[in-house]
Structures are given as C-alpha cells and as structure tokens.
Image: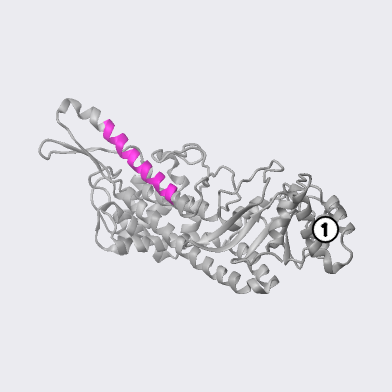
Amino acid sequence: MGAEVTVPMFAVVGAPNKGKSSIVATLTRQDAVKISEISGTTTSAQAFELNIDGIPQYRLIDTPGFQRPRQVLSWLQQHSPNAAERQQVIQDFVSQQRHEGNTKFQDEIALLQPILDGAGIIYVIDGSRPYSPEFEAEMTILQWTSQPRMALINPIGGEAYVQEWQNALNQFFSVVRVFDPMTADQQKQFTILTAFAELYEPWRHALESTIDTLQDYFKRIEQQAALLVAEHLAQMLSHVSETKVPAEFVQQTLEKTLKAEYQQALRQTETDMQNQLQALYAHPEMHIDTPTLDIDYPDLFDSSHWYLYGLDRKKIVMLSASAGAAAGVVIDIGVGGASLMTGALTGGLLSGAASIFATATPENLTIQGLPVAGKTLTAGPIKNLTFSFALLGRAVAFLDLVLKRTHADRTVASVNGDNNYFSDRFNRLNKSDQVQLTQLLQKAHQGLDAQELTKLRDWILQIIKLELKQ
C-alpha cells in the first residue's frame, strides 16, 4: 500500500479547529504553518519537515478537517464485503471521487491520500469539549486504513473531558496522549516521538536517532544562544561613543547629540541580540509589543525601571563588597566615561559603600571632555553595577522567553517584568559563582576576552537551566 517512505511521515488529522496546525507547528518548529481560530483555515494537505542541519528527520502533513465523515463511512460500508478488503475500499473511494471530479468529499480525500501513501496517523481532538458518538465515524475510517495511529488530546480550553475522550479513544488507537502544543517543552515533544517509535517498528530506529539528534541540537543552540547574549552584553557594557569638538560654542549641542547616539547604540545592540536569538530558535515571525519594547519592557535608560530586570539595592551592595574583598585589588568602577560614581574604590568595605551611593542615585549619563588635540567628548562605558545586572537580567529574560516559546504560540510576546524574575534565578547560583559573575560584570567595561566570554556564557546557561527545572 502506498509509496516507500524515506523518512517517517505522519498525517495530522481530525475535525476542523482542533489544533492540528498548532501541533504541526510545534513538532516541526516552523512559524510558516498557518494557525487561526477560524475553522477551515487549512484547505489542502501541506507537508512540513523537521530538518536538523539540512537533514530531514520526519515529515508532518497538515490536513483539512473531516467534513462529512458519516457519509464517507456509509459509502465504505456499502462497498466493503469483509474486513480484509477495507483498506482497498478506502483506496477505491478516493480514486472514484477524484475520477468523478466530486468536490463534496474533497477534504476527506485530501486527508486520506497521505495515509494511503504510507503516513502514520496522528488524530487530534479537543479535550475541553465533551465526547460525542459523532466522532466515531472519523475514528472508524482511520481504523479501516490499518495504518499505525495515535491520538492526541489537545486541551485547547481545558481538560474537563479528557477522561471521557481517553475511554473512547483507547478503543480505536494503540496510543493516546494529552499534548498541548502551546506549552509542550522539549521533553513532551520527545514523548510523542518515542510513543510512535514504539507503535511502529519500521520507524523505531529512525525516530530514536531523531531524538538523539534533537537533544544534541538543542544543547548546541542553547550554548550558541548564551554565548550570543554574553557577546552582546560585553559589547554594550564596553561601548564608547566619541566626537570631536571643533569649537566651544557647539559643545553643548554636541553633548546632547552624543548622549543620544550612545543610548541609541546600546538600544540597537540589544535589538540586534534579540533578533539573532529569534533567528537562532527559528522564530522570525514572533511578535513583540513594540520594536523598542517601551510598554511592557521598560526603556533601557529609564533608571526607575532598572530594578525590574536586575537585583535589588541590598544585593548589589553585598555583591560589590564581596567582589571587592575577593579581588584584593583596586576595583576601578567609578573613574571617567559615563560612570554614575566617582573615585577608585579598594577592598570590600569601600566597594560596598560606593554601591550604596550608586544605587541610590542612578540618574543621568555624564559626558566627559578630554583635551586631546582640541577636545573630544566621550560617552561611556557605563560602569554602574546596577545597570550591568539590569542589562543581564533583560537579556536572560528575553532568552528564556524565546527558548521556551513553542511555534504554535502566536500571541504577542511580552518579557516578564516581575521584580523577582532575574533575582530569584540569580540567587540559585552558588555564592562563589555569584561573586565571580559580579567581578566579570565589573570588568566588562574594559572588554572581555574569549575565555571570559565563555565563563559568562556558562553562567547564563546555569541561570536558564535552573529556571527550566522549576
């Protein structure tokens, strides 16, 4: 029956508006799958492949919903003398309707054809709606195909009727699982592939190999994402903007312009980081409230909102003091550039005291003029530790959002602005890592070498993975 399948292929079928396309989007990690609450959005069968490094792992066929299953079943029953011929009768039905040009059953033909071509069946229902015998016609038709099949209960509006559906589905399908494509993490997606590998022996090896490939792939892109964040964070913390002053009377105007350019450079670097993270996790169509995230994601230079993504004042003081004591050397976090503090600070006590001053008055950038062959105005780098943690917190929050977001979720993305979002995760690092990370952020305004960027990447990964275990 059907053509030889080079990669595991699944037809995702069911009644309209049960979340079939959402499941396809999540399991193939593609934003290209059209998803809508309007019934009948999928009007023809369309194949989507999961490719890792250009190698196809499996193919899902997004199909139209059943429209007239009872009429189709009636036709099949009339033309099937015994169980041994049921599979062939389904083929005859599809062939005859196409030959006659009958559009009445075009949706059923579209969803049955890939199954006749050798696709396994993933039958999708809505677990928030009560079970009804009218669905038995659909399940019976699928049963007649004799193809390996599993049922997924999609709790679109809740799980009120999941047990009812499980009782019914178990009579038609060898495997029944509850699967929410909007929230399914990597492990839940692996569970679906594992179940099908157990269900259909010819695909077992390929699907088990796919799971291993995906695990390695997810680990690899997590490391790439964390390094990407580390590199952009270091770039922002060490950024300097400069301009020459040709004459005294234009200095005030140039100061305002330079300040704006400096702020825009940091904002652009953060935006570039976010765009690259979206591309890395194949979310090019992910929508955010505004390009600058000014509403749900406080403005980068609005110091009144720094605490939303960083650490509180008391924690900053403690970390700065600990880092200073641990270093045992002069920690210059206040001289020159656009620092919000002044003076070189040594040891734990002075370092902690200076942080009290810094976090109490995080106001405006200071632009310093240096007489070098005339005058050069310099903005940056910002050495304020509160600001550094705020940038790190914002970056980790965005990475966490993109990493967790499934491709079925087409809602507008909003980065969590909870006061404790970053601090709760940071505090789960051991004390030594907290202090070392603080020292690294203090040094970041000078630039970080490859080894230091790797360390920063590893701490970012730790913070993200601690969150994932909650």
Task: Tell me the crowding category of disc 1: few under 14, some 14 to 19, or many 20 or more residues within 10 angstroms, Cα based.
Answer: some
Q: Position of residue 89 (x, y in %)?
A: 81, 61
Horizontally, residue 415 falls left or right of residue 339, namely: right
What amino acid is labelled 1 in the image?
A: Glu
- 323 or 236: nearer the viewer: 236
Which of these two is toward me, 140 or 331?
Answer: 140
What is the quadrant of the N terminus in the image? bottom right
Q: Give residue 273's position: percent from left, percent from top.
A: 40, 49
Residue 226 makes an appearance in the image = yes
For residue 199, which quarter of the picture? bottom right
- Farthest residue, direction front: 99
Rendered residue at 42%/54% (across/down): 315
Main SS of residues in magenta: helix
Q: Is residue 136 left or right of residue 236?
A: right
In the rendered structure, the answer to whether residue 448 lies left or right of residue 359 reads left
Please provide percent x and percent y for residue 399. Answer: 47, 53
Q: Identify the residue at the far left of this view.
A: 373
Q: Quadrant of the C terminus?
A: bottom right
**How are the residues colored?**
one colour
Residue shown at the point (77%, 63%) measured from the top left: 145
Which residues are drawn in magenta? 256-276
- Report the residue marked by disc 1: 164
Residue 310 at least partly seen: no
